[in-house]
Image (spheres, rainbow, N blue to C red):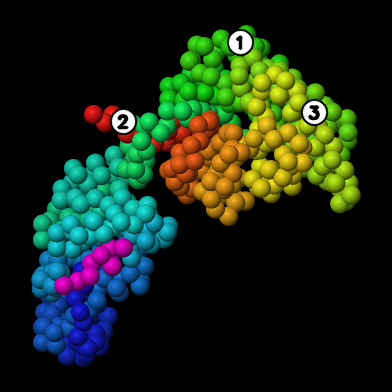
Amino acid sequence: MVLETKKVTRNEVARRAGVVPSTVSDVINNGPRPVSDETRAKVLAAIDALEYRPNAVARQLRRQCTTTIGLIVPDTCNTYFAEVAQGIEAVAYPDYAQLVCRRVAAGEGLKSVLVCGTSLGMSIAANKVAGIRAALCHDVYTAHQARAHTDVNVLCMGAWIVSPQRAEGILDGWLSTDFEAGWHQPRLIQLENPALDPGSLDKIRFGVTLSPNTSVFVPLLFAGQLEDGMRQAAENGFRVVELSLRKPDDLSEEKLSSLLDTYGLGLSAIATGQSCLHDGMCLAAADPSAVQGAVTRLKAHIDLAAKFEAAVILGGIRGRFTGSADEMAEQRRRALAAVAECAEHAIDRGVQLLLEPINRYETNFINTAMEGLDFIEDVGYPEIKLLLDTFHMNLEEVDINATLTRYAAKIGYIHFADSNRYAPGLGHLQFHQFMTTLIANQYDGVITAEILPLPDDERAMEQAGAFISSLSSAVDDE
């Protein structure tokens, strides 16, 4: 709430009232120091006589007085601000609303309060800022619901509508209420992202990555609790699961088939990195016997995958190159031969091999989509396709959407994980944009969430399921 200022300073008001400048601020802002009624009257008289109009909003923004409240206009009971309120319509309030909201969106504060005459314009302007959920509240109940159900981070109130006494209760109710999440989480994601056409999603199967055993590889849900994981995957709307296996006999074919049938799930792929992490069987190993061990293990995974029409992933099992440049070149030649042997085995059994680029902090052997395609070309088996993971892409690709478009014809599988490797929606990646790009390029494969079990397995699964639910509207078009 701001008026154009005249060229009258706070110091001039202080001199006329016979007080120090800080006392003028205390009167205007109702504190923080107490002012006697007599002194307050002198200051207000000086303000009226000099027609002093401070830019209170800009001053508060500069001071950054709190990390919880981005902006509060001083108490409208003050006779001075009652007069200021008359000029609200002349103020460029969208500028101030968006200035504060950009700060909240950038993490400089957790919440903000915006006040103007009705606050209708403030709320509209605030909601134009990405990451902001602003609500206009004129009673305690709507303020409570705004936090509990829609995780509102900007409270808007109308000074012409709400009395100071009621405003205090609204503010207290809003600040003291936590977001309830749960059932409301997918609705919140829907509010922040436009729903996609349900028909465009029909051919895409969504899943989650599980493991029958615990592992040093952390981004797995319900590791060692496979049946619980499958049950919750089905309950959260997933159609398939990806299994991370150390050895093909970690789980009998009969048991796996029974679990998949029980929970109505398909097996989309077998991830093989545990062989390298736990057993040293890596395609880039310096020891040729370790490379042969990886090939033997991969062939067994391929045989198992063939029985469930699943793919096999060449990701963590690659390991990393070590030694001199010549030694690393030799390791790459062995890896090429090993993958070619596996590719021929997979083609004979109708199994899709997937090559997954992994970020530079985990390996030096294929970090980007382009490097993956170069390797596939060198292997000589174009049937191998790329598996692109948004967590790794965020670290390695200049533009994720451009990469998804450029290599659309070679993408056979997608991993979704947010920038922090949490479930989609808990970091800063724009997954609805990714989905729009994939659909525009007619992607019709599998998308699985390979995510950290945080804050725990169950809630990570729920968040991933909420994201899937948010992609399309719950109401069918007539």
Q: Disc 2 marks which residue?
A: 474
Determine the CA span between mark 2 and mark 3: 47 Å
Q: Is disc 2 in contact with disc 3, using a CB cutoff of under 8 Å? A: no
Q: Is 393 left or right of 176, judged from the image as shown?
A: right
* Crowding near the residue tagged with mark 1, few <14, some 14–19, many ≥20 C-alpha atoms within 10 Å: few
Type of the residue with mark 2: Ala
Q: Earlier in the sequence, mark 2 or mark 1?
A: 1
Of the numbered discs in the image, which one, if any, rests on residue 341? 3
Determine the CA span between mark 2 and mark 1: 35 Å
Residue 78 versus residue 62: which sits nearer the camera? 62
Q: Residue at the location (76% across, 36% down)?
A: 380
Count all numbered tags in the image, as a single digit: 3
Residue 477 seen: yes
Residue 30 versus residue 205: which sits nearer the camera? 205
Q: Position of residue 435 (x, y in %)?
A: 45, 40
Q: Earlier in the sequence, mark 2 or mark 3?
A: 3
Q: Which residues are magenta?
A: 90-98
Q: Disc 1 marks which residue?
A: 255
Quarter of the image with the C terminus in it? top left
Compared to 201, does 396 lie above or below? below
Compared to 115, does 285 lie above or below? above
Main SS class of the magenta portion in the image: helix
Where, by quadrant of the figure, is residue 381 drawn? top right
Give SS at disc 3: helix
